[in-house]
Image (cartoon, rainbow, N blue to C red):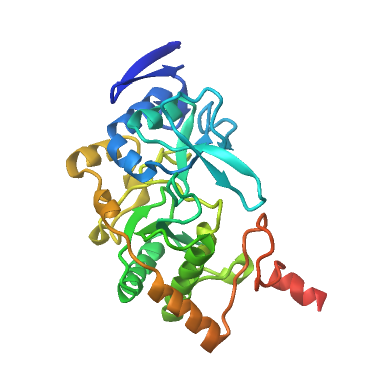
Amino acid sequence: MAEALELEVGGRTVRISNPDRVYFPERGFTKLDVARYYEAVGAGALRALRDRPTTLQRYPQGVAGEWFYQKRAPRNLPEWIPTARIGFPSGRFADEICPTEVAAVVWAANLGCLTFHPWPVRRHDTNHPDELRIDLDPQPGTDYADAARAAQELREVLAELGLVGWPKTSGGRGLHVVVPIVPEWDFTGARRAVIAIGRELERRAPERVTTAWWKEERGPRIFVDYNQMARDRTVASAYSVRPLPRATVSAPLRWEEVSDARPEDFDLVTMPERFAAVGDLHAEMDDHAFRLDAALEWAERDERDHGMGELPYPPDHPKMEGEPRRVQPSRRKRET
């Protein structure tokens, strides 16, 4: 096994140790293959990560080995990769890397980072999201096709609110729709907007879409995971490699591609070819910033006219004002 080699990336020299280490046994992809993948799609990957505090999902021995999330910047961080201090719901803080060059993405790949998890904020203001991320998560009994149908309906809902979303595969069975927003609202406000959007989508397709936090209440429907907009919750960034046997990636899509696309179509081999042909389909996202006023008016309407208030937060969050009990419905019934 080769000990190391160097890649020249955007004027930086990035060292790749153990380049022949197999990361994806099913297909034989190595660490070097992952590094060269991120070099090939670097402009798109950086666009999704630029200036964002980013958690690294690391697989130093490949997908068959142990893995972990790294939130705090590694001690051997090069001086040319900036960081930003972010606050967790617990009140603790951490300095996370904020990529500003493609070389930073390749450098992280050398650490075994397959999937990048950027916060929906920029390093100059870590408390006000500039992206609304809507996660359409297939539940047992549903698949990508169901998520794609929900995404098309979501597109119509967003249009009624004066919003435009950019869709991408999650790299698994689901879909993410990203809406660039004015960084005027905090995480609580952005999450509230996603809840309102999810509830409207659920009203229009109650047999196919749900906002139910408890799995026992979801059934075979697409779950709008509103808590992905809670503080310290992230989704895989565009172009991120996913730790699945076939090395699929999170692929930006055109809206007209959503229904016919298949997650397995986009992987470590096919995405660089696609990127060379069509470029970054989300490149124009940073040219837009939409307001959430209309979505928050829907939230107020739901509270005022329908008695639909707060929904449960993730278990590691402190109890929030107006939040219902974090007790499974079946357990609640037993207690009464």
Number of labels in the image equals 0
Relative to the observer, which residue lies in front, 109 or 269?
Answer: 109
Residue 61 on image: x %, y %: 53, 26
Q: Quadrant of residue 33?
A: top left
Residue at 75%, 70% in the rendered image: 331
* Residue at the outermost bottom position: 305
> Left or right: where does residue 278 sit relative to residue 228?
left
> Left or right: where does residue 114 sit relative to residue 75?
left
- Quadrant position of the C terminus in the picture: bottom right
Residue 229 on image: x %, y %: 50, 59
Residue 32 on image: x %, y %: 38, 23
Q: Is residue 302 visible?
A: yes
- Quadrant position of the N terminus in the picture: top left
Residue 34 on image: x %, y %: 39, 29
Determine whether 240 is above or below 209 in the image: above
Q: Quadrant of residue 166?
A: bottom left
Residue at 40%, 36% in the rendered image: 99
* Residue at the outermost left position: 277
Relative to the observer, which residue lies in front, 110 or 184?
Answer: 184
Q: Is residue 249 visible?
A: no
Residue at 40%, 30% in the rendered image: 104
